[in-house]
Image (cartoon, rainbow, N blue to C red):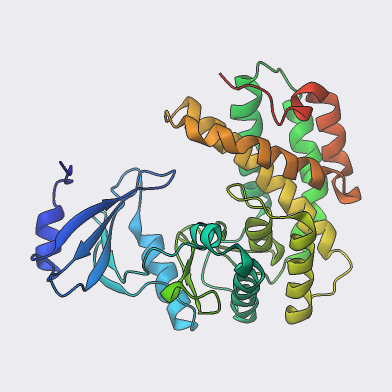
């Protein structure tokens, strides 16, 4: 029995889809819910319910319009009632890049090259009308590590030192990211749709509602240091170099900035995945933490991260780090 949120039937009818069958689709780590609408003619659309106050569809609508205006492939908006959290969009199908590669592993380089090329095209656009990815945002995200993970494993840590170390490594990066590019912030294999099930097709973009203006390396980190899918380090390096060649990005600090943003993002994700378990009752995310922790350790080895690496050495026991973050109750 499908649990239909209040107001769904009325919204769908007003949008001209009242005769469609409604099938629920598994959601993500948010409060959003998704449904596929299917008419007798096999015409389909995607229905998102992002109910206030937990969610706000307005940013999604704003970013989707901007991306499509720039020639990118965000889903077309068919109808929306943001006050009630309803958005009806074009259906990109079922071919998420991650799942598609499970079936077509020989196409990995083709698919990732296309995903990198989409980022190159995005970064050629003037930055969108979005808020900056500034120091306070970086720090707020990084603090999720000490707000959720360290208490969950029973550690008392130097919180002031944590913030000071991050400020030290992020300050020069923040100065270098101006004027910035549009950063989608969750650009990874689960949020890239292979339209028509073809690796070389234009990349269908989803889950971009948190876009900011920031550093061009950030979405590369999201893609190549994927919390949900193993990406071979040598392959990630090959794709990173493909981006630099196509984008003409040869700044001597770029690789260090990539590692810095990798460490910041991976520390944040460890905190988020712990929170999803502790607060939201979603333990499945704990299984991903060892992968994220390994990526974090690799990033901390870069000289640009020396102050943050020293904090980890002083505050996080080596045994926890060797076991991919330890056991979270």
Q: Position of residue 206 (x, y in %)?
A: 44, 63
Of residues 214 and 18, which is closer to you in this image?
18
* Residue at horizontal 45 percent and vertical 76 percent from the top: 73
Task: Residue at 86% x, 63% y: name it.
Answer: 253
Q: Nearer the viewer, residue 321 or 262?
A: 321
| Rendering quarter of residue 109 | bottom right
Indicate left or right for 62 with 185 as reference. left
Would you say residue 160 is visible in this rendering? yes
Horizontal and vertical percent position of residue 147: 60, 28
For residue 263, above or below residue 286: below
Q: Using residue 209 as the reference point, say whether residue 147 is left or right of it.
A: right
Q: In the visual, does 140 lie left or right of 13? A: right
118 in relation to 294, above or below: below
250 lies above or below 272: below
Residue located at (67% from left, 63% from top): 220
**Quarter of the view holding residue 248:** bottom right
| Quadrant (top left, top right, bottom left, bottom right) of the C terminus | top right
Q: Is residue 84 visible?
A: no
The quarter of the displayed image where residue 321 is located? top right
- 307 or 23, which lies in front? 23
Quadrant assignment for the N terminus? top left
Residue 43 falls left or right of residue 262? left
Spot occupied by residue 120 in the image (x, y as percentages of width and height): 65, 77
Residue 200's place in the image compared with 227, above or below, is below
Q: Please state the horizontal and vertical placement of residue 143, each as a whole percent of the image.
A: 64, 36
């Amino acid at each position: 029995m499908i649990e239909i949120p209040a107001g769904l039937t009325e919204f769908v009818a007003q949008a001209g889809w009242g005769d469609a069958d409604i099938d629920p689709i598994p959601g993500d780590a948010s409060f959003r819910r998704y449904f596929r609408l299917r008419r007798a003619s096999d015409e389909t659309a995607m229905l998102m319910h992002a109910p206030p106050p937990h969610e706000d569809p307005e940013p999604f609508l704003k970013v989707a319009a901007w991306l499509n205006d720039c020639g990118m492939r965000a889903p077309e908006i068919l109808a929306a009632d943001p006050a009630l959290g309803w958005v009806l969009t074009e259906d990109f199908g079922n071919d998420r890049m991650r799942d598609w590669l499970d079936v077509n592993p020989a196409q990995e380089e083709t698919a990732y090259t296309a995903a990198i090329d989409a980022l190159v095209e995005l970064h050629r656009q003037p930055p969108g009308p979005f808020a900056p990815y500034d120091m306070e945002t970086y720090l707020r995200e990084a603090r999720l590590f000490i707000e959720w993970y360290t208490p969950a494993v029973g550690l008392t840590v130097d919180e002031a030192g944590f913030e000071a170390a991050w400020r030290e490594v992020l300050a020069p990066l923040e100065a270098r990211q101006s004027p910035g590019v549009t950063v989608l912030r969750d650009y990874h294999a689960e949020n890239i749709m292979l339209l028509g099930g073809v690796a070389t097709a234009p990349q269908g973009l989803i889950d971009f509602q948190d876009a900011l203006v920031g550093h061009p390396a950030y979405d590369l980190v999201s893609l190549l240091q994927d919390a949900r899918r193993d990406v071979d380090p040598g392959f990630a390096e090959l794709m990173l170099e493909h981006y630099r060649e196509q984008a003409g990005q040869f700044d001597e600090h770029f690789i260090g900035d990539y590692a810095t943003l990798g460490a910041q993002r991976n520390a944040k994700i460890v905190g988020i995945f712990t929170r999803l378990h502790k607060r939201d009752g979603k333990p499945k995310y704990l299984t991903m933490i060892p992968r994220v922790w390994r990526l974090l350790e690799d990033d901390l080895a870069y000289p640009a991260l020396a102050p943050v690496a020293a904090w980890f050495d002083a505050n996080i026991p080596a045994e926890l780090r060797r076991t991919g973050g330890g056991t979270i109750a």
